[in-house]
């Protein structure tokens, strides 16, 4: 059997959580393959909104199993809070949730190091979520990290202390004003480690191969977005993992030839949290209107998201990098009532017109827009593709033609039910 991937094509927050939840009934296993609690995936059904950070978005479905893969970094403290939020729903987590022994742990000092490094960068800070993501992946690739499976081994506390001491030294070297109380943070951390141990640790790649051999279907859930990919994103304003399709191979141990569909999710406009270039960013009333109607505030940090028009140049690039086979367009409802809608089709790069995504988006890139007539009608209650307004459908058709990939889902609201299968 094969694996399908679902990933964000922009700078994150495209609505991955919602769509994974919608699709889960078709899959046996939902598996996160990278990122950590920098992610905030929102699901809404029965009038309740849920935000997940580390736990896969299939957790609310009765049958599906949920796996946190080896490519993920886990903060036990945040994980414990997520479990607590799930308590009212009486989910049998012992039989439904599994953690890879090879996933890396975010230590309290990873979080501190993240904060110290951002302080040291000053104005050129990444705008990280301060969840310790960068430092944890640095220790992973630097071969110093502590993995979930290590806590089953006796001497792990020695390893922990050595690494934590090293982090404190690194923080000192950065000479920033960072106040912290490590004993307090460690108390919370070791308590949370006990909670983490209530969940089954497994050799997740073998778990996946067994299930594939038994004909089971797997959906790999991406976090962040393609433009935040460590290799292909707007470096250095990116996250520290491969958010693109290849990340699912390394982050779960999935052989490339087992991947079938790659679902690419994008918003009908663009948002970005944190620093970094964003050519189509709007600083005018339209940007504010999108932010307000779209409720564009980070699900993890609560920070306001920067908003702008859809960037087709960047989107085409993301479609290529991921080999997207099906597109899903989110939040078209937010644009209802706009007289005109714009899409960036090229950039003016210091006088030259370019239609490719350049090495750096930080140059004087000026977007060249194509304008569309908007639609007046509220589309949030429409549940059939053919009932969508003509101007909306024209917009969809234009995007499909340009991207050369069909749009298979149109989302018109945050709720599970506000989903049109095309
Ligand atoms: P993720 O990180 O990709 O899972 O996305 P987030 O959960 O961070 O952000 C998406 C936000 O948009 C959430 O608040 C969702 O509830 C909401 N949302 C998802 N799809 C739609 C949609 O089609 N329309 C509207 N208005 N909101 C949506
Ligand atoms: P989901 O999965 C949006 C951004 C941060 C910052 C940069 C680096 O919800 O789409 P990090 O903490 O990873 O070192 O931050 O990446 N970022 C996200 N932006 N959605 C996310 O996840 C993000 N995860 C990280 O704002 O600019
Ligand atoms: Mg999010």
Image (cartoon, rainbow, N blue to C red):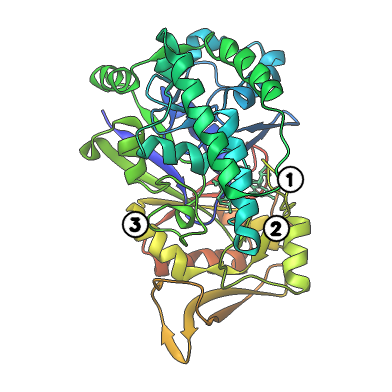
Q: Is residue 56 visible?
A: no
Viewer-proximal residue among 183 and 303: 183
Label 2 CB, ligand 1: below 8 Å? yes
- Distance of label 3 from label 1 (alpha carbons): 30 Å
- Of labels 3 and 1, earlier in sequence is 1
Q: Is residue 335 above or below residue 367?
A: above
Mark 2 in CB contact with mark 3 (< 8 angstroms) = no
Mark 2: few/some/many CA within 10 Å (<14, 14-19, 20+): many
Q: Which numbered disc flags the more N-terminal residue, 2 or 1?
A: 1
Disc number at residue 334?
2
Q: Which residue is situated farthest in the bottom direction here?
A: 351
Q: Which label lies toward us, 2 or 1?
A: 1
Q: Nearer the viewer, residue 194 or 308?
A: 194
3 vs 1, front mark: 1
Q: Position of residue 196 (x, y in %)?
A: 55, 15
Which image quadrant is residue 250 in? top left
The secondary element bearing badge 1 is classed as loop
Is the residue indicated by label 3 positioned so its CB lies within 8 Å of ligand 2?
A: no
Say whether disc 2 or disc 3 marks the residue closer to the N-terminus.
Answer: 3
The numbered mark at residue 321 is: 3
Picture residue at 26% right of the left edge, 22% below the top = 209
Residue 151: horizontal and vertical position, in percent?
45, 13
Q: Which quadrant: the N terminus?
A: top left
Q: Where residue 302 is drawn, which disc sits there?
A: 1
As helix, strand or loop, the secondary structure at mark 2 comes to helix
Location of residue 4 (image quadrant): top left
Give neighbour class at mark 3: few <14, some 14-19, many 20+ (Cα, 10 Å). Answer: some
- The CA span between labels 2 and 3 is 28 Å
Of circles 2 and 3, the one toward us is: 3
Picture layout, residue 328 above or below residue 46: below
Which element type, helix, strand or loop, lies under badge 3? helix
């Amino acid at each position: 059997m094969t694996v399908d991937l679902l990933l964000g094509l922009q700078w994150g927050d495209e609505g991955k959580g919602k769509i994974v939840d919608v699709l889960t009934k078709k899959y046996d296993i939902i598996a996160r393959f990278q990122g950590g609690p920098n992610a905030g995936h929102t699901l809404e059904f029965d009038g309740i909104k849920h935000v997940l950070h580390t736990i896969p978005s299939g957790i609310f479905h009765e049958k599906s199993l949920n796996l946190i893969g080896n490519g993920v970094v886990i903060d036990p403290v945040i994980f414990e809070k997520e479990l607590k939020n799930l308590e009212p729903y009486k989910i049998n987590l012992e039989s439904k949730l599994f953690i890879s022994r090879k996933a890396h742990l975010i230590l309290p000092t990873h979080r501190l190091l993240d904060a110290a490094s951002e302080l040291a960068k000053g104005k050129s800070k990444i705008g990280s979520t301060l969840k310790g993501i960068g430092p944890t992946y640095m220790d992973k690739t630097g071969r110093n990290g502590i993995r979930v499976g290590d806590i089953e081994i006796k001497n792990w506390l020695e390893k922990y202390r050595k690494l934590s001491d090293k982090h404190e030294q690194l923080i000192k070297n950065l000479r920033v004003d960072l106040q912290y109380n490590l004993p307090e943070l460690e108390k919370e951390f070791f308590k949370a480690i006990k909670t983490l141990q209530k969940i089954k640790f497994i050799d997740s790649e073998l778990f996946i191969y067994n299930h594939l051999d038994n004909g089971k279907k797997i959906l790999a859930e991406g976090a962040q977005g393609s433009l935040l990919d460590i290799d292909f994103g707007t470096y250095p304003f990116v996250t520290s993992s491969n958010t693109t399709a290849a990340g699912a191979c390394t982050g779960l141990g999935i052989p490339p030839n087992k991947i079938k569909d790659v679902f690419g999710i994008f918003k009908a406009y663009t948002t970005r949290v944190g620093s970094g270039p964003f050519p189509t960013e709007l600083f005018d009333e339209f940007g504010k209107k999108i932010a307000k109607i779209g409720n564009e505030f980070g699900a993890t940090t609560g920070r306001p998201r920067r908003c702008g028009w859809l960037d087709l140049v960047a989107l085409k690039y993301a479609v290529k990098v991921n080999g997207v086979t099906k597109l899903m367009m989110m939040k078209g409802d937010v644009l209802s009532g706009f007289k005109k809608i714009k899409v960036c089709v090229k950039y003016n790069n210091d006088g030259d017109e370019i239609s490719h995504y350049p090495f750096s988006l930080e140059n004087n890139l000026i977007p060249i827009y194509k304008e569309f007539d908007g639609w007046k009608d509220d589309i949030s209650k429409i549940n059939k593709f053919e009932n969508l307004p003509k101007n909306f459908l024209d917009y969809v058709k234009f995007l499909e033609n340009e991207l050369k990939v069909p749009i298979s889902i149109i989302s018109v609201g945050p709720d599970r039910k506000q989903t049109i299968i095309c």
